[in-house]
Image: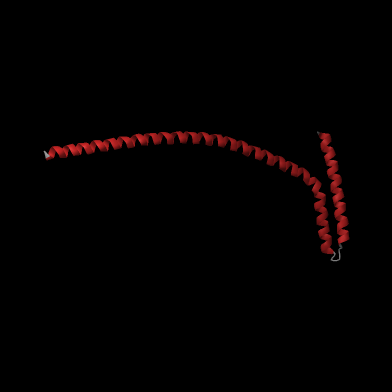
Amino acid sequence: MITDISVACIAGAFVILVIFLIIGLVKFYKTSAEINKLLHATKKNMDDLASESVKLIKNVDETTIDVKKKLHALDIFFKPLSTAKQDMDLKSKKHKDYDLTTELIEGLSAGMILYNKIKGGIKEYVKSR
């Protein structure tokens, strides 16, 4: 009799364990299905984001090239000002008594030359368009 009760208890415990195992497996299956959906959605979002990033990088590259071309075109206008500044620096090193008035006059003349070149360049640019 005791063996029958023991076997029945063991069988009942085994059935309860199997039920919990089945419940656990079902929950694991549902969770893995949700994770799989999330991974697919994330992959799709990453692909969309990657294509947008590539477009953005191409746009930035084109803008950078355009800015470099425009800066190169402006070098023509700023070259005289740079040369004038270098000349002023050489003169100031040679003559310690080089006064501010002379420097201002030379700076203004360099500015006027630059203004005339810019003004002429803009007219040429407008004519070319």
Q: Position of residue 26 (x, y in %)?
A: 35, 34
Extreme residue toward the left, this view:
1
Q: Position of residue 78 (x, y in %)?
A: 80, 48
Quadrant of the image occupied by residue 124: top right
Q: Residue at x 84, y 48 (%)?
A: 114
Colour scheme of this structure image? secondary structure
Name the quadrant of the N terminus: top left
| Side of 25 where 61 appears, left or right | right
Quadrant of the image occupied by residue 101: bottom right
In front here: 47 or 18? 18
Q: Residue at x 83, y 63 (%)?
A: 94
In front here: 117 or 3? 3
Q: Position of residue 10 (x, y in %)?
A: 19, 39
Extreme residue toward the bottom, this view:
96
In front here: 22 or 75? 22
Q: Residue at x 83, y 40 (%)?
A: 122
Quadrant of the image occupied by residue 58: top right
